[in-house]
Amino acid sequence: MARRFSAAYQDEPFSALATWARRLAVFSAVAAIVSIVIIRFGFLEFKPALATFFGALAIAGLSILVAIAAFAAIWQNGSRGMGRVLVALLLDAAILAYPAYLAYQYRRLPPLYDITTDPIDPPKFETLAQLRAGEGTNPAAYAGLYSAEQQRLAYPDIEPASLDVSPQQAYDTTLALIHKRKWLVVDSRPPMPPRREGKIEAIARTPIMGFREDIAVRILPDGPGSRVDLRSSSRYFEHDLGSNAARITKLIDDINDATDNIRPEKKKQPTTPAKGTQVKDPVKR
């Protein structure tokens, strides 16, 4: 009896809807991957590639609808194709999961693209300002006090790093952490006299698409120690989906952890003559 049922099932045709659901899911996955590669490596203009990516997401959504219709058809007429429906739904879920998370971030967070530890006097982009002068890029100047207030409400814990080490030690530690993250350093100036300020400018990239986000670091003496201010700003789009705040928070934490084990540099004390040693006056001419 089981053999007859199996043979009868094998004779049933595949559901056309199930086949199309799988085809649409595969096409959506290929289009999404190709568009991500184009954007990340800059093979073409990113706007058409981004439009292709959004088109791939729309096709994945269509594939889900067709898969649901295929499931209903298979349930009614007993045709084959449930495996194709499951493959389509798994592919669609993999394609749409991260964009769905970003959409949630878009609704949850304020539309900010420029985050800094010092909204009153943020670190400035100098070398990077030239790269932000093109069409469609965000300005190099800080977004302003309204943005600062939005940042304060959304990310109240973002503060500068106050360290018990010298500015040079703070600079070396921060630069090492930036190199460890494989950010592209475009300018680095240690705090050497007579200049009090140390400065680093670098470019980070978002994890999947690889969109450029610019970083400026400022190191200043602060009493016996030093203070590190950061600024992270998206080069494109008016909403960073929380990426800049996350980057600053993680880097500040790593700087604090790395400098906790560094011994502060001891200031050289002026040498005093040994007891009983007579200091001769300079020869007068």
Image (cartoon, helix red, strand yellow):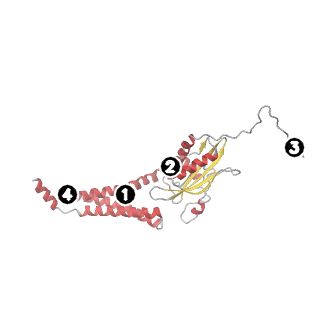
Whole-percent x and y of residue 74?
Answer: 21, 58
Instruction: Tell us which disc is closer to us: 4 or 2.
Output: 2
For marks 4 and 2 on the same chain, the one whose residue lies earlier in the sequence:
4
Mark 3 lies on residue: 283
Which kind of residue does numbered mark 1 sit on? Answer: Ile
Residue type, numbered disc 2: Ala
Classify mark 3: helix, strand or loop.
loop
Judging depth in this view, the residue of 218 and 274 nearest the camera is 274
Marking on residue 76: 4
Q: Are marks 4 and 2 in contact (CB under 8 Å)?
A: no
Label 3 – label 4 distance at C-alpha: 114 Å
Q: Is residue 154 visible?
A: no
* Mark 4 residue element: helix
- Please rate how many residues cluster around mark 3, counting C-alpha atoms within 10 Å: few if below 14, some from 14 to 19, many from 20: few
Q: SS at mark 2?
A: helix
In 3D space, how far apart are the residues under numbered discs 1 and 4 (Cα atoms)? Answer: 29 Å
- SS for tag 1? helix
The mark nearer the N terminus, 2 or 3, is 2
Three-letter amino acid code of the residue under disc 3? Val
Do the residues bearing badges 3 and 4 touch, measured as CB atoms within 8 Å?
A: no
Q: CA distance from mark 2 to mark 1?
A: 24 Å
- At a point 43% along the width and 52% down the height, the residue shown is 104
x, y (%) of residue 237? Answer: 51, 59
Give the mark nearest the N terminus, 1 or 4: 4
The residue labelled by disc 1 is 95
Q: Nearer the viewer, mark 3 or mark 1?
A: 3
Instruction: Report x, y in % for residue 272.
Output: 76, 36
Residue 246: give its label. 2
Question: Along the polypeptide, which appears first: circle 3 or circle 1?
Answer: 1
Alpha carbons under labels 2 and 3: distance apart: 65 Å
